[in-house]
Image (cartoon, rainbow, N blue to C red):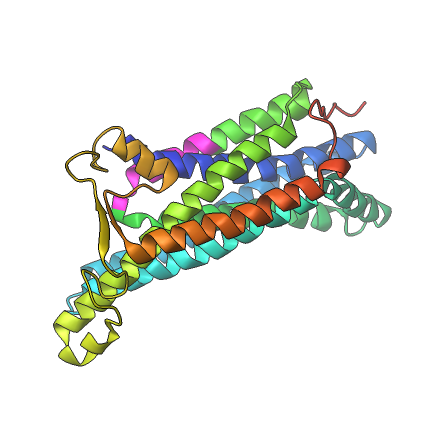
Amino acid sequence: MDLTAALPIFVITLREGFEAALVVGIVLACLKKAEQTQLNPWVYRGISAGIVASVMVGFLLGGVLQGVETAQSPYTPVLKETLGGLFGLIAIIMLSWMLIWMTKQAKSLKAEVEGEIQSALANSENAEKVVFLLVFIAVLREGFETVLFILAKFQDGWTAPTLGAIAGLLTATVLGFLLFAVGVKINLKLFFQVMGVFLLLIIGGLVMSVLKDGDLAVHLLGELDPRYQSLCILSGDSCLLGNQVWDGSQILPDRTFPGILLKALFGYRQTLYLVQIIAYGLFLGIMGTVYFRSFQSSASRVPSSSTKLKKAS
């Protein structure tokens, strides 16, 4: 089993899971401070429901992919590549948006969650529902993004990504426990900045994968029906990606170390085409600029690097 396939899933699940852990920790701290710990079970129910819902979405969409793979149709390979590219595209959009959004909301997150909890406690009739939904949505949002990324990488198999997701969730849970329950100092700014850089590189690799899926789908479709050969809009080695500009199959293959590690974390491919390189560079250039500008613009509003979220007394 190739465990390197678990690395990008681990990074994404760790970051997304830790974001959810922050919301959960803030909610529990607010309830303890307000002496309303009898609502804690609703927090745990929200966590459980969010995880179950994410897994159910994964099984549902995964079942669609499995059904396509086993379908007895000459167009099955085309549908498989098309669905892989579609899930990858959605994952790129959602992960990129959440990366920028979370960076901008880092300072106000605690105040917003505390405000919602205080409003809920003021209205005791709806307190349980508000607490449950707040935690449920936070967990489901992060879980759904992870599920989409796993589905976009489903060609690599299910075992390694599943192990990576479990390891990421466990690590995020431990970090959340250390932060809120033990009171350990964690440099939140540095953590999210480093994880954000890794996430950008992983999404960049997904951009190249989506382009490759689309190119292969068009190529296969043209082979099945000559009428669709006109979809090959570029002349050269590829229908949509232009000429091949890199072949590292002999000097740095992406199926053996260290190429396989570079592929998992940084989007390296042993075979690269012109459009892939251009798209990768544009994505990192544009999204990297937006990301670091959003980080710098909120730097004056984010707590110092020694941020410590203490247990509520």
Q: Residue sitting at 42 percent across and 50 percent down?
A: 281
| Relative depth, front residue between 295 and 135 | 295
Q: On the picture, is 71 further left or further right than 305?
A: left
Q: Which residues are magenta?
A: 156-168
204 falls in the magenta region: no
- Give the x, y percent position of residue 291: 58, 45
- Give the x, y percent position of residue 246: 23, 46
Q: Residue sitting at 78 percent across and 25 percent down?
A: 312
Magenta residues: mostly which secondary structure?
A: helix
Residue 156 falls in image quadrant: top left
Specify whether residue 13 is in view: no
Q: Quadrant of the N terminus?
A: top left
| Relative depth, front residue between 261 and 129 | 261
- Give the x, y percent position of residue 48: 54, 41
Q: Residue sitting at 17 percent across and 72 percent down?
A: 222
Q: Quadrant of the C terminus?
A: top right
